[in-house]
Amino acid sequence: MLRVEGLHAHYGQAHILHGISLEVAQGEIVCLLGRNGAGKSTTMKSIMGLVPPSAGCVEFDGRDLAGRPAFEIARAGIGYVPEERRIFTELTVEENLAVGRRPAPAGMKPWTPERAYELFPVLGEMRRRPGGRMSGGEQQMLTIARTLMGNPRLLLLDEPSEGLAPVIVERMATAILALKREGLSILLSEQNLVFANAVADRACLIETGQLRHTASMAALMADEAVRARYLSV
């Protein structure tokens, strides 16, 4: 579904990503793990075209999207949920979902507000509430639901559990696993190892903009030395 090969990215003169390579298969959840500032969010933004790659390949469903503008990448079937959420605070839940709506590809069951409310029941209870009057966890759910309304086949989730109460983190994990059962491919970045272990099939460990280690989540959880080297504070 997604193949990233030799991805480099810069912020001005600063070289942030150094040859990142990874893959996400159909229906697979892959987690980018690393300390704060390791390059996880920049990897996401480079795949999405928000930080133009300076070198490398971003191949989605056989098509190289590296260097394409973000709106073309979104139309190709990649949805992006930023860490900052960026909902429209003056619009209601229903209106936020309407803003994200795009036609579904042929053969794909389209996302509707009703399906979004099934995934996140709390949104259905506040469908006419403005986004600015929602908690952080509710806004995170709304951001994911709005992205799903674009009917992506690959979802990029940047730090979905950050700053959320434990009960909301648990609901988020349940929703992500439900999306996987529907066949959606997901690439997420996380610092919360417990959350990552609950949802991900594989982990890619990033340090100073370089991919240092790739393993199944089960293998990573069994390897204390690797976790201590790349994830401990």
Image (cartoon, rainbow, N blue to C red):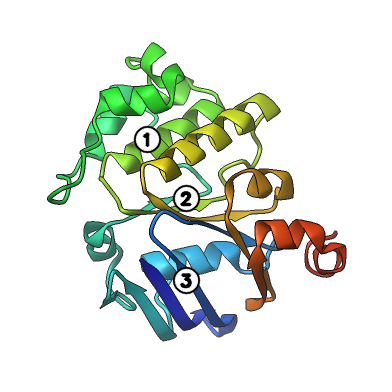
CA–CA distance in space, label 2 to label 3: 20 Å
Q: Secondary structure at mark 2?
A: loop
* Residue at 41%, 21% in the rendered image: 123
Which of the numbered marks, if any, corresponds to residue 18? none
CA–CA distance in space, label 3 to label 1: 24 Å
Q: Secondary structure at mark 1?
A: helix
Is residue 50 visible to us here? no
Q: Secondary structure at mark 3?
A: strand
- In the depicted structure, whether residue 163 falls above or below residue 219: above
Name the quadrant of the C terminus.
Answer: bottom right
Residue for badge 2: 82
Residue for badge 1: 145
What percent of the width, then of the height, locates residue 139?
48, 31
CA–CA distance in space, label 2 to label 1: 13 Å
* Residue at 24%, 30% in the rendered image: 112
The answer to which quarter of the image holds residue 143 is: top left
Residue type marked 3 = Glu
State which tag comes first along the sequence, 3 or 1. 3
State which tag comes first along the sequence, 2 or 3. 3
- Relative to 105, 70 lies left or right: right
Residue for badge 3: 23
State which tag comes first along the sequence, 2 or 1. 2
Residues packed near mark 3 inside 10 Å, few (<14), some (14 to 19) or many (20 plus): some
What percent of the width, then of the height, locates residue 50?
39, 65
- In the depicted structure, whether residue 148 falls above or below residue 1: above
Residue type marked 2 = Pro
